[in-house]
Amino acid sequence: EVQLVESGGGLVQPGGSLRLSCVASGLTFSRYVMCWVRQAPGKGLEWVSSISGTDGSTYYADSVKGRFTISRDNSRDTLYLQMNSLGAEDTAVYYCQAGQPSDNWGQGTLVTVSS
Amino acid sequence: DIVMTQSPDSLTVSLGERATINCKSSQSVFYSSNNKNYLAWYQHKPGQPPKLLIYWASTRQSGVPDRFSGSGSGTDFTLTITGLQAEDVAVYYCQQYYSIPYRFGQGTNLEIE
């Protein structure tokens, strides 16, 4: 059974930073493109970023480009999202997803940007 | 960038009836080299992660009831739910995975009458 467990969410002040992690099990992690998807309160789903499993190519939504960095450690079966210069618009539940498209999702971790 | 637009934004249907949700992409998501439409449908309930229902526009994900079906090609797609059940109350999203950014539609809120 595939399991994805996110962590690292919490309350952060505007302009601050946070690093999310997603630990995967039950799949050959290195073979999967991994994604971050978020949902702001009362809003729809927004694709944030993806990283390929093979060459580590990274892709970002315009809304986070230059502020967020996606990375992965295939030896630890772990996906990361480094989030810098956070603003209120980044407040959301962040989900990691294995594959695209995919039914393999974590339960999500809440990031709240507020003073 | 490919923009995904769903209609309607919300939908109220009686139990046992049919629900139809439309999704239009601003550019074709059909890849002729493999004859596939790069379009997926997700169901999202509060407090849960999204659930993949349909991929390649019409292929039902394993374990998804056959009352869910997807159709369409190119830029116009439809998710149909027949014999609506109470557990189908959710927000439904289409998503294109043809090109980055993998945008979702704005979502359609399905309620039971």
Image (cartoon, rainbow, N blue to C red):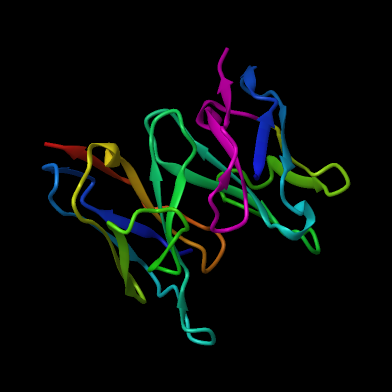
Residue at image coords 20%, 47%: B84
Residue A26 to residue B30: above or below: above
The furthest residue to the bottom: B33
Residue at image coords 65%, 44%: A1
- The picture places residue A97, in percent across and down from the top left corner, at 60, 47
In the image, A85: left or right of A104? right
Residue A82 to residue B18: above or below: above
Residue at image coords 69%, 27%: A7
Residue at image coords 51%, 63%: B97
In the image, B5: left or right of A90? left
Q: Is residue A70 magenta?
A: no
Residue B102 to residue B109: above or below: below
- The picture places residue B32, in percent across and down from the top left corner, at 48, 86
Visible in this render: residue B106?
no
In the image, A62: left or right of B25? right
Count of residue discs: 0
The residue range painted magenta reads A86-115
Q: Nearer the viewer, residue B63 or A69?
A: B63
- The picture places residue B99, in percent across and down from the top left corner, at 54, 67
Visible in this render: residue B99?
yes
Q: Quadrant of residue A57?
A: bottom right
